[in-house]
Image: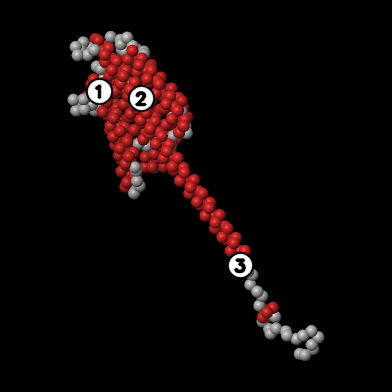
Amino acid sequence: MFFTELHLGSLIALFLLVAAALYGYGVYRLRQRGDAWPPARTVAFVAGGLGSIAAVSVTGIEAYDTTLISVHMVQHMVLSMVGPIFLALGAPVTLALRTLPAAPRKKLLAVVHSRVARVLTFPLVAFGIFVANPFVLYFTDLYRQTLLHSWLHEFIHVHFIITGCLFFWPLLGLDPLPNRWPYPGRALLMVLSVPFHTVLGLTIMQSKTLLAGDYYPSLGLSWLDPAADQVTAGGILWAGGEIVSVTMLGILILQWVKQSEREARRIDRALDRQEAEEAAEQARQEAGEHTEPPRPDAAKITNGGPADTRGPGSDTP
C-alpha cells in the first residue's frame, strides 16, 4: 500500500520528473555524438537519488507522514541524506557542462562560481546549516505548523533536499564546485556530523514532551501511541544517521583511494617522460663525442690540381 499509491500533484513530483527528463536527455545527447557517460552515474542519480526521494514523497508513505512521526523521520533521513548523496554522485552539473551550448554553459559556470554559491557551499557554512536545521525544526513550534499547513509541510521537504545537497555536494560530489576541501578535511567534517544525529535522536527518544504538542493525540487514532512512536522516531534518527554517515565515509575513502591512484599514475607518467628525455639527450651527447671530423682531401687542397712532389730547392718545372 505504501508504494502503490502515487501522488504526482506535488512540487517535489514535478521536480523529480523534470530532473529525470533533463538528465536522460543529457546522456542521450552525449551518446549521439559518440561520447561516453559512466552508467554508474546515471544509476546513482536516477535510481539512488531521484528514486529514493520519490519513494518517500510521492508514494503512500507520504500519506502517513503527518500521522506517524516515525514515518516522517524516515522521510527526513532520505530527503536530507540518502537522496542528496546519490544526486551528488550522479554529477549532473558535469553532464550539463558537457552537453550545453557555449552561452548557457558560461551562465551555468557563473552561477556555480558565484559569490552566493561560494558562501552556501563552503563546508563549514553548509555543515552549520545541515546540523542546526533539525534542532530548530523539532524543538520549536515550527514542526507543529508544518503538520497543520500543507504548503509549509512541502516546503520543509524541499528544504531538506536543498540543505542536504549543500552539505554533501562539496564533500562527495564529482562536479567542479568551489570550496573543494582536501580529503582529510572532508573526512573530518563527516565524522563531526555523526554526534549531532546521535544527540538529536537520543534527545527525542528520552523526551517526555511530545513533539508538535497535542497534535498526534488529537488525531484520536486508537492504534497509535504517540509516545512510543516518538521513541521509534528518535531511534530511526539515531541509528539511521550513523548508518548513513558510516556509508558516506566509506564512499569518501574510496574516492580518496582512487584519486591517490590517479595521482600516482600521473606522477609515474611524468617521471617516465623525464627519464626518456634524459636518455635521449645523453644518447645525442654520446653520439656527438664519438663522431670524428672528416680528413682533408689533398686534391681539394691544391684546388683539384696534382699534388706538388718536388723537394725543397728543386727548380725542375
Q: Which mark is residue 291?
A: 3
Q: CA distance from mark 2 to mark 1?
A: 24 Å
- Percent from the top left, x then y, of residue 57? 27, 25
Q: Is residue 47 left or right of residue 245?
A: left
Residue 276 visible in rendering:
yes
Please state which amino acid type lies under the numbered disc 2: Glu
The image quadrant that residue 230 belongs to is top left
Residue 160 visible within the image:
no
Which tag, 1 or 3, sits closer to the chain's start?
1
Where is residue 91? Give x, y as percent: 37, 37
Q: What's the mark number on residue 115? A: none
Looking at the rendered structure, the kind of residue marked 1 is Glu
Between label 2 and label 1, give the one nearer the viewer.
2
Nearest to N terminus: mark 3 or mark 2 = 2
Q: Residue at x 32, y 29 (%)?
A: 83
Residue placed under numbered mark 1 in the picture: 62
In three-dimensional space, the C-alpha distance between marks 3 and 2, rounded to whole angstroms, equals: 73 Å
Q: Secondary structure at mark 1?
A: helix
Q: Amino acid at mark 3?
A: Thr
Tell me the distance, in whole angstroms, between the alpha carbons under discs 1 and 3.
Answer: 86 Å
Q: Are marks 2 and 1 in contact (CB under 8 Å)?
A: no
Taking the image as shown, residue 294 lies to the left or right of residue 259, namely right
Q: Is disc 2 surrounded by few (<14), some (14 to 19) or many (20+) residues within 10 Å?
A: some
* The image quarter in which residue 43 lies: top left
List x then y, in percent, for residue 233.
29, 18
Query: Of the numbered discs in the image, which one, if any, rests on residue 242?
Result: 2
Q: In which quadrant will I find the N terminus?
A: top left
Q: Nearer the viewer, residue 127 or 114?
A: 127
The reply to whether callout 3 and callout 2 are in contact (CB within 8 Å) is no
Under circle 3, the secondary element is loop
Residue shown at 44% from the left, 43% from the top: 262
